[in-house]
Image (cartoon, rainbow, N blue to C red):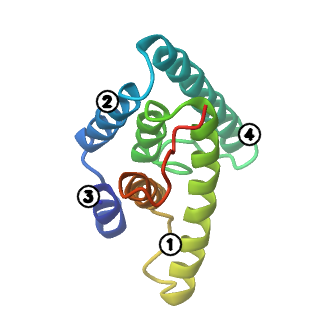
Amino acid sequence: MLVFFQDLRHRLVDWYLFVVIGVLGSVLLLQTIGIEQYLFYAFINISVVSLILFLLHVYARFKMKKPLLNHSLGLGDILLFYGMALCFPTLSFLVFFIFSIFFSLLISIYLKYKSPNDYKTVPLAGLMALFFGIVYFAHLTQIYPNIYLY
């Protein structure tokens, strides 16, 4: 929730919060699976995030003619992607990542519609962190019993 509020209000998030997300999510995942599976999933997820960032970099540089960092995507967004990559098995991560991007898109469209002058940029890390919190809340309260599909 801190990431959400900081990103929504200031468009800046303290870097250590992304480390906390990655560590706590990793601990929760490690309670469910073994270390070998965890390392395998972490490697695959980090590779997927790196590939997505590479493709975004190429698109931003050659199509949009802008640098990726701080023009198309913030450092907090990138750190959140990597932090979340450590929190789920690959299938769950891909589903979570896609739905969190979709959730962020819908909320940002709504925010821009309600007050267009206040939201010229999308607080992607904050909205994804809010979705992440909702998913973990549903898991911890047994609304959705197992978020670790593998």
Q: Earlier in the sequence, mark 4 or mark 3?
A: 3
| For marks 1 and 4 on the same chain, the one whose residue lies earlier in the sequence | 4
Q: Residue type at mark 2?
A: Val
Where does residue 72 sit, x and y in percent of width and height?
Answer: 56, 50
As measured in the structure, the alpha-carbon distance from the residue carrying label 1 to the one carrying label 2 is 36 Å
Q: Secondary structure at mark 1?
A: loop
Q: Which of the two marks, 1 or 4, is nearer to us in this view?
A: 1
Residue 15 left/right relative to 66: left
18 or 75, which is in the foreground? 18
Q: Secondary structure at mark 2?
A: helix
Q: Badge 4, how many Cα within 10 Å: few under 14, some, many 20+?
A: few
The residue under label 4 is 62
Amino acid on which disc 3 is placed: Leu
Q: Earlier in the sequence, mark 1 or mark 3?
A: 3
Query: What kind of residue is marked 4?
Result: Phe
Q: Which residue is mark 2?
A: 27
Q: Do callouts 1 and 4 mark residues in contact (Cβ within 8 Å)?
A: no
Q: Position of residue 12 (x, y in %)?
A: 31, 55
Q: Quadrant of residue 90?
A: top right
Q: Residue at x 74, y 39 (%)?
A: 62
| CA separation in Å, label 1 and label 4 | 23 Å
